[in-house]
Image (tube, rainbow, N blue to C red):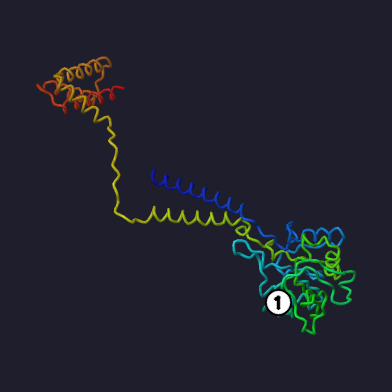
Amino acid sequence: MKRVRGDVVVLVLCLIVLIVALIARQKNTPVPSFYSTYDTRANGYRALFEVLSQEGKKPVRFERRLEFLPKSAGTLFISSYESDVIAGVSFHPLNAKDIISLKRFVQRGGRLVVADPVNGGKEDSVIGLPASHPIPQISYVRPAIDFPLVDGVHSVVAPVSAVFGRNNPKVLPILATERGYVGIEYAYGRGEVIALTAPKIFSNAWLAHVDNARLAYNLLTTHGPLYIDERVHGYAQDTTMWQVLPQAVRFSIALLCFMVVLWLIGGNIRFAPPFDVEVPDERDSGAYLTSFSALIRRAGASALTIRSYVEDAHRRVSRQRATSGPVLALLADLDRLTNVARPTEAQILRVANLHARLRKELT
């Protein structure tokens, strides 16, 4: 039992050391900035959310699956989430059901605003979004035409590393460079889709430019209540308790379960012949009495000891005037042992036991 407890202590100590090391490593690892309204770093959209809130537009952070998007939503804004990766794991990328929900939302009259440098995948084709292609990075973008959505916008300042092609007659260019379109708009069903290849236009680092903020206001607040998808960035109301835990804690719990399984296997499945543990030498009172009687015999006091027991027994019986059968029988047995010339150790023990029984009968 002591060995098992020692193993448990060692496992617990190893687990504690591992948890501390993982947490320390996670703290030292730089966390990338996400295109989320909760993020206050360079790429975050916290400034955008605060600006629109101060203007009284009341943007809503939507953290549920898109199938639960309320019918009252007029504009849905989805920013790039491909970079929202920690330790190689993405948060909540859009799936087939989400794309179907987007299609229904736009077809019934909603405005979908997508800010993502990578466009044109299989999911994008469902809502007619054309493909984009990378270009050498540039920083200045101008409105393509005189259009209400870019009213008052003269030049947008933000890093641009991808554009849409100019050979698509179905789209209406909003922002353009000499290399292609940075922003486009096209009708889909009763609604419209607006796509930007430069999500940093609305980021904390670049929203301070007046034209960037004016463009955000025009695109996001002129078509009904604004809902900003935060589930794609990991802020999901349907997140399980396991998903809420930090990765270091989840890894430690899994490792602890693995160690417990190994401990149970080692304690219940025999992998070797049984090993008999040596029983410690613990003597009882019988061994003491045997040793004491042997000492009396070697000292030549066996007869004297027996006679002392018998005389004490007679004094007790006469003092209490006991005449019961068991008492007299025990006294007779003691008298017979006094006639032994050279008592043995067993006879000395016999006298002591008879004397003890006699005392119990008299009490």
Image height check: is 305 above or below 261? above
Q: Is residue 214 left or right of residue 246?
A: right
> Is residue 329 toward the left or the right of residue 202 in the image?
left
Residue 350 placement, left or right of 196: left
Per the image, label 1 sits on a secondary structure element best described as: strand
- Asked where in the image residue 251 lies, by quadrant, the reply is bottom right
Left or right for 354, reference 119: left
Image quadrant containing the N terminus? top left
Q: Residue at x 86, y 63 (%)?
A: 210
Q: Is residue 116 visible?
A: no
Q: Quadrant of residue 168?
A: bottom right
Which one is nearer the viewer's eye here, 241 or 218?
A: 218
Q: Residue 298's x, y, as percent?
A: 14, 22
Q: Is residue 14 above or below residue 347?
A: below
- Position of residue 60 measured from the top left corner of the image (x, y, whole percent): 79, 63
Can I make out residue 89 in this image? yes
Mark 1 belongs to which amino acid? His
Mark 1, residue position? 133
Q: Residue at x 27, y 35 (%)?
A: 281
**260 or 133: nearer the eye?**
133
Q: Position of residue 52 (x, y in %)?
A: 84, 61
Q: Is residue 194 above or below residue 236?
A: below
Rendering coords of residue 236 (x, y %): 69, 62
